[in-house]
Amino acid sequence: MPDPNPGIRVRIAPSPTGPLHIGTARTALFNYLFARHTGGTFVLRLEDTDVARSSIAYEKDILDGLHWLGLTWDEGPDVAGGADLGPFGPYRQMQRLERYREAADQLLAEDRAYPCYCTPEELEADRKSREADQLPSGYSGRCAMLTSAEREARAAGGRRPAIRFRVGEGVVAFDDIVRGHVEIDTSALGGDLVIVRSDGTPLYHFTVVVDDADMRISHVIRGEDHLSNTPKHILLFQALGYPMPAFAHLPLILNRDRTKMSKRKSQTAVGDYIAQGFIREGLVNYLALLGWSSGTEEEVLSLDEIVERFDLARVQKAGAVFDLERLEWINGQWIRRLGPQELIDRLRPFLEAELIDGRIDRVPPDEELSALLPVIQERLPTLGTIGELVGFLFRDRIEVEPALLVPKRWDAATTRDALIAARDVVAGVGEVSFEADELEPPIRGLAGERGWKAGDLFMAIRVAATGQTAAPPLFDTLVALGYRRTLERLDGAIAALGDPAV
């Protein structure tokens, strides 16, 4: 019998049938926060009984993602030599099959469950019959009251039974920490529940109850999509004689159009956000705010600060809209808080990826990156945007479409004249005095003398120097590019525009 007084114990129980989902990560985070805030225990369990769809690759993605987020679990089987998993590996359902057999045998012995010999064809016929009679979908109860002789006859005919749990009639009521009092009539549960397949493999609704009881889980904190499953689990807890955990169902994560977040409309894999250069501090901070309020106006919070403030009472009922722009803003705030060397170290893999993909021609040394930090750190929403922000600095040459060089209010001839004049100004400043505060006054003065809008002149120079219309402040960009390369790129743009007199 499980310990009736286990203290606070929570779990995350992903299925390795896909990569770590952003919703699973949010659920893991809320469980972790609750455990750390209360001094409880955080458990990881892999629900891997779906052998056909589970894979080692997905398992690795889930474990790596949880570690990357900093969500370390507190117990599990010893994994000697498994440094990547920390001191403990996760619990795995496929290593607990004997335990599920024991629990199923208990329910059979007490007539809380029974063998079901229905064939797929019989179940389909029943489904169609109930549909034609406009009855709720669900099991008809065909095998619920078979005599011993009838069961023996079916077994003798070669039928291997599944095991069904007797759901019974009535209303299941419980008090959810987030959603309040909930009542669900058992008539909505689809009839008696298959808990073990005919091949002997246990099913989710059964294993989750046995596992939560054996692992002494005190609070089941999970997504709202599991709310309708909770009556089934409560009935199984009661039938097996297990202590009942508390339940807290977190709000759904929604797309911007308020539909349920799905990979068809949104990026859902945590690994994709990591690959784009979201940093753990930013992603954890944002996930914590998806359905929970700190109780203040503060939005930028460290993991330790969130742990200190976390309270399930401040989890909202309404769906939480996933706002990518807000995530990028929070992520950018955390990038700004990184120390110089830490930012350089985190940027390096993204610069190396740019090099491998042929978007830059070299990876700058630390000294060069360090000099750029005052220009770029305030402008990076993610680490992965480093290439589009300043990749032009690390290319030997750029190709610029002539049409891109021409500001909207100008023609090609005006643009070419302006770039020739700007080149003369840059050359006049000289290499020794090539600083932003030495460049800006004469180039602004040039625009005033010629009657040009400074923004048009700046845009033409920016595109000539970088090959793009968006870049850090122009004069800082030219200084980072350097005197000689600035002149080379201005010459290249002038040549690309051609001689309008020819």
Image (cartoon, grey):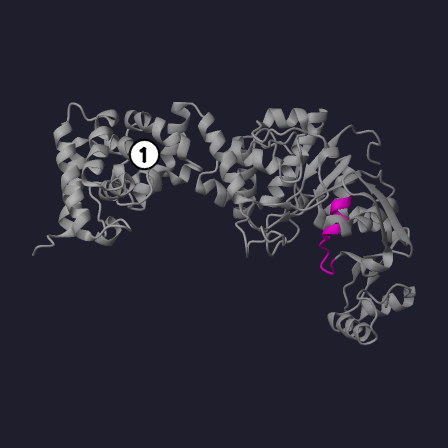
Q: Which type of secondary structure does the marked residue at label 1 adopt?
A: loop
State the residue in front, 54 or 102: 54
Residue under numbered circle 1: 473
Quick check: can you spot residue 438? Answer: yes
Q: Residues within 10 Å of mark 1 (few under 14, many from 20)?
A: few
Q: Residue 353, position in %: x, y?
A: 35, 41
Amino acid type, callout 1: Pro
Q: Which residues are magenta?
A: 197-209
Quick check: can you spot residue 166? Answer: no
- Residue 144 in which image quadrant: bottom right
Q: Is residue 55 left or right of residue 317?
A: left
Q: Residue 380, position in %: x, y?
A: 41, 35
Q: How many marks?
A: 1
128, above or below 484, in the image: below
264, above or below 120, in the image: above
Q: Residue 161, position in %: x, y?
A: 78, 62
